[in-house]
Amino acid sequence: MNDTFTSNEIHGGTSTEVLKRSFLDNLSYRQAKFPAVATTYDHYMALAYTVRDRIMQHWLQSASTYYEQSVRSLCYLSAEFLLGPHLGNNLVNLGMESETRQAMLELGLDLDRLLAEEEEPGLGNGGLGRLAACYLDSLASLQIPAIGYGIRYEFGIFDQELKDGWQVERTDKWLRYGNPWEVARPEITFTVGFGGSVREQVDSAGNYQVEWVPDRHVMGMAYDTLIGGYGVPTANLLRLWQAQASESFDFQLFNVGDYQGAVLEKIASENISKVLYPNDEALQGKVLRLQQQYFFTSCALQDMIRIYLQRSSQLGNLHEKFTVQLNDTHPAIGVAELMRLLIDQHAMPWELAWEITRRTFAYTNHTLLPEALERWSVELLGRLLPRHLQIILEINRRHLEGVRKRYPGDEERASRLSLIEEQGSRAVRMAHLACVGSYSINGVAELHSRLLRDEVLRDFHDLTPEKFHNVTNGVTPRRFMLLANPRLSALITHAIGDGWIRDLDQLHRLEPLADDAAFRAEWRVVKRAVKEDLAEKVQQRTGISVDPESLFDVQVKRFHEYKRQHLNLLHILSLYFQIKDNPAADVTPRTFLFAGKAAPGYQMAKLIIKLINSVGEVVNGDSDVNGRLRVAFFPDFNVKNGQWIYPAADLSEQISTAGKEASGTGNMKLSMNGALTIGTLDGANIEIRDHVGPENFFCFGMTVEEVASLQAAGYDPGSLVRDNADLSRIMHRLSDGTFSRGDTELFRPLVENLQYHDPFFVLADFSSYVERQREVSAAFQDREVWTQKSILNVARMGHFSSDRSIRDYCREIWQIDAIQPNGFNSKFKP
Ligand code: H53
């Protein structure tokens, strides 16, 4: 092997020779192993370091360019980043997968085995966290200067196992063997205060001064993960904060001899970044959660100010150099924190501080569910962050003064617009704080943004209509097509070139090929192969054998009643009883695949998981069914498993109650991989249908307006059961022990909830759903037409690239331009 490489080549080159050399260096000097004793994990680590070095070169060049040109940057504040495994994605983005595969091969190693070693960082629950990760990919790929800020949870989202059909949660120890992708930055550490009191005094010059004296301090230390763009020499930072005890306070206890007390305090501090809350909706009243939110937001803002002051001596133009996107209200306390930093720490007058703050933040809302809109009790907030409560009350006082001037005498409106909810125990409405403290407010799909404007945030829309935007979500085609579905990607690239990877609208060029029988045949060969791959995984993980020839009917997402996995189940049962009535019935063979986690405390969602498995047990084992229906639950849905599942789906289930799913992004991943959607007119489904064409989309169910009028008219789900023989038999059989080994109690809560309450209108949409499913079954019989529709789905999904979303944000909201890093020396050209 040539050993006269330059340092630049060793860390940046991508030839097979240089990769082998870097890999072996890393195995020796970073992993401290010699080849004879190195394990597969050591090889994975050595390769990860090799790849990280290459992104590091891009990052050093990007960061120095940003610094030199003093560029305007985006800071994306998010309590969750659901990144998924790095190695495969980075190889794809750096365009070095085949060289790396070859280098490993020459060293006697199999790249796929090394890829399988990676523990994914599950620092998110679902849609919101994964969206943040897709946006980081697009930001880097579009060369937008950006930093992601979040929390380095020691335990991410729990691992899901199934025991007797029930979900069991296991702690996710993703950091157990180290994390080669991050760089610890002990020099970038900030102090964050909690509790204590606020002292007000007039200094000798007669100036009124406020001093917050916290009774506890926690340190936030930065850990940086590099996010490289696709096919460009740009890399950005994801900076995650880890909580550490501050020496100052445990020292005090230590000095008075309370060693144990000091250690307990240390543990309490470090708990802040210990674990991700596994609920993806309401999180009220959890003091640790508020601590997490304040902790990472404060560190992020202090870091921005630090970076800003490297180039400038006064903070008056902070909003020109940074814009901060709030990913939901989780970081909304940042509005009060930036005010505090500017006023208390940097002696700025209120008016100027408010001007800067208001022009810095932009807020994305991700939900209309009232229970998911964050509210923190005034009592709790005042105890934990007394200075912030003061600031929030002052913001509110000034805000309501403006409201009353604009709408004299309209006290009801003032109370609706207030940052403080006065009914019951007083609470701070974080969405209102975010609205008042931001220059932009956006929803994540057209319908969702409309409902925000017309309903949830209607008064704010009346007040400041110019702040409102829609940015429909998107997903990255690099991870969810190129990496997850290399076969389909190769076929597409062969047909239309590789421009689609950076410009997804180019997929349109596939449209004429939908009419080309030879191309359709190739498309089917690909689909068949990925279905075989998934069938093998399903067999390994569940013991259930599924037929790749059958229709793969897929619902993968978090479990929540509004997402209506139980509606899907009712359809399965309807087919099952059809077969029981007439075993010779002509049913299209289907594999129903479910995956997703339920919040550990959400009993109904967990019962739905149990029911899926129970129905599976009966249906899969019934000789009348004879394999025509298969029900499988793929455990531990995460990014890695998603990458197996999305490519293999024929049918994508997007069946939420209209008006409940803000956008959905799984709908996009599935359709981009050639699945047809059966979906309600909810979230981004509507836009997907508009793009792919209603003839290539199975739409069913009530509209938002119909749901509202049914609710207003008084909804009686029981009458639907009585009037529908199919439904009444299903409901009966769910309670008579058929699916619960004779236990007539097990599923009673679910059945009664549907029959007497049905808050998500499952039964109301049942008939329309079953009818559409009949059409799906018929359509799948004609493989040529189905394939045509599948190709057209992919061809018309360009709009749902996260690149388009990020361009929308840049143009309409952030006003940030792309920057080419200068002075790099790699195969990438500016
Ligand atoms: O955010 C996704 C949407 C999806 C919505 C989801 C979400 C969370 O994952 C967590 C909390 C929350 O309020 C919303 O449910 O519809 O696609 C990204 O915008």
Image (cartoon, helix red, strand yellow):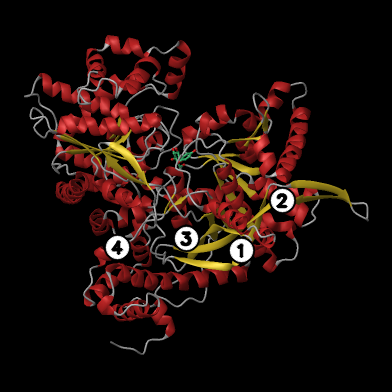
Residue that lies at the very extreme toward the front in this rendered image: 257
For the N terminus, give its image quadrant. bottom left
Where is mark 3, residue-wise? Answer: 140
**Distance of label 3 from label 1 (alpha carbons):** 25 Å
Q: Nearer the viewer, mark 2 or mark 3?
A: 2
Left or right of 450, for residue 490: left
Judge: label 2 CB < 8 Å from ligand 1.
no
What residue would you read off at disc 1? 189
In this view, the residue farthest toward the left is 584
Q: Residue at x 48, y 14 (%)?
A: 712
Whole-Å distance between the Cαs marked 2 and 3?
38 Å
Identified by mark 3, the residue type is Ala
Residue 198 drawn above or below residue 246: above
N-terminal of the pair, mark 2 or mark 1, is 1
Circle nearer the N terminus (4, 3) = 4
Q: Looking at the picture, how far across and down is residue 793, in whole percent?
A: 29, 42
Q: Residue at x 23, y 18 (%)?
A: 736
In x, y percent, where is residue 206?
93, 52
| Local crowd size for mark 3, using a 10 Å CA cut-off: few (<14), some (14–19), many (≥20) | many
* Three-letter amino acid code of the residue under disc 4: Leu
Amino acid of disc 2: Pro
Residue 463 appears in the figure = yes
Neighbor class of circle 2 (other Cα within 10 Å; few <14, some 14-19, many 20+) is some
Which label sits on residue 115? 4
Q: CA distance from mark 4 to mark 2?
A: 46 Å
